Amino acid sequence: MKIICIGRNYAEHAKELKNPLPAEPVFFMKPESAQLRNNLPFFYPDFSNEIHYEAELVLHINKVGKNIQEKFAHTYYDGIGVGIDFTARDLQQKAKEKGLPWEMAKAFDFSAPVSRFLPISDFPDLNDITFGLYKNGEIVQKGNSRDMIFSFDAIIAYVSKFVTLKQGDYIFTGTPAGVGPVKIGDRLEAFIGNEKMLLCNIR
């Protein structure tokens, strides 16, 4: 399996990082080794001094697809969860300044905590899904799928032009404004609506 992540998909987040709004979806990849499941703790790596959280809605891909038309894209995912795209912001910034790839800042081991998935049938409107992230009991991010620049289906149609989607893949669909650093001892909790989906303790 692979993890496909969409960048700059919420206008306010793009602004907070001083990035231009994209005309097309921007995506990057995390390997299977980035996955962190079952509410296991995240151990702060020794190669970074600035790990940031980015909470995102996550799609669970349920079948193989290539060059998927947007009108059929909804049939290629069967569940929605929430995840955290941990980012070594200091490493990312150094790479950007040198015009280098920044996989080391995004794709490192256990950089993608992922919750369980709720079936699509649980959501009356996929364009109106609220989610949020709490750090130490205080809300730091709050988003809604209606605020995405590119919808779930548009993302799937675009990404599948370049990368074959396979059953069990995840798509992280972008983070809203409010990203920030974590430190050892922090407690992150992610919600969809009022339902707690993910717990991640930083150690």
Image (spheres, rainbow, N blue to C red):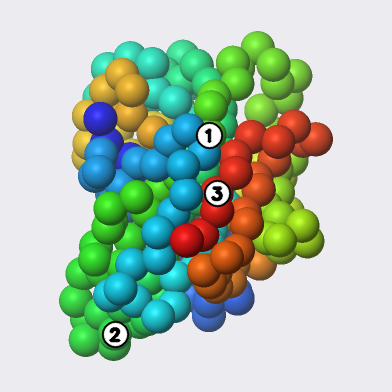
Q: Position of residue 79 (x, y in %)?
A: 53, 21
Q: Position of residue 4 (x, y in %)?
A: 34, 43
Query: Tags 1 and 3 in contact by the CB under 8 Å rule?
Result: no
Q: Would you say 140 lies left or right of 156 here?
A: right
Q: What residue type is labelled 3?
A: Cys
Query: Tags 3 and 2 in contact by the CB under 8 Å rule?
Result: no
* Most foreground residue, 198 or 142: 198
User: Who's the residue at 75% across and 32% down the image?
Assistant: 195
Q: Would you say 161 lies left or right of 58 here?
A: left
Q: Mark 3 points at which residue?
A: 200
Q: Which mark is residue 75?
A: none
Q: Residue 115 carries which label?
A: 1
Which callout, 3 or 2, points at the residue further toward the start of the chain?
2
Taking the image as drawn, is residue 27 in sight? no
Q: What residue type is labelled 1?
A: Ser
Name the element at disc 1.
Answer: loop
Look at the picture and state if 148 lies above or below 125: below
Q: Distance between the residues labelled 1 and 2?
A: 30 Å
* Most foreground residue, 123 or 19: 123
Name the element at disc 3.
Answer: strand
Which callout, 1 or 3, points at the residue further toward the start of the chain?
1
Which corner quadrant holds the N terminus? Answer: top left
Look at the picture and state if 6 lies above or below 195: below
* Most foreground residue, 153 or 97: 97
Q: Mark 2 points at which residue?
A: 94
User: Who's the residue at 28% across and 75% down the image?
Assistant: 47
Q: Would you say 75 lies left or right of 45 here?
A: right
* Tag in front: 1 or 2: 1
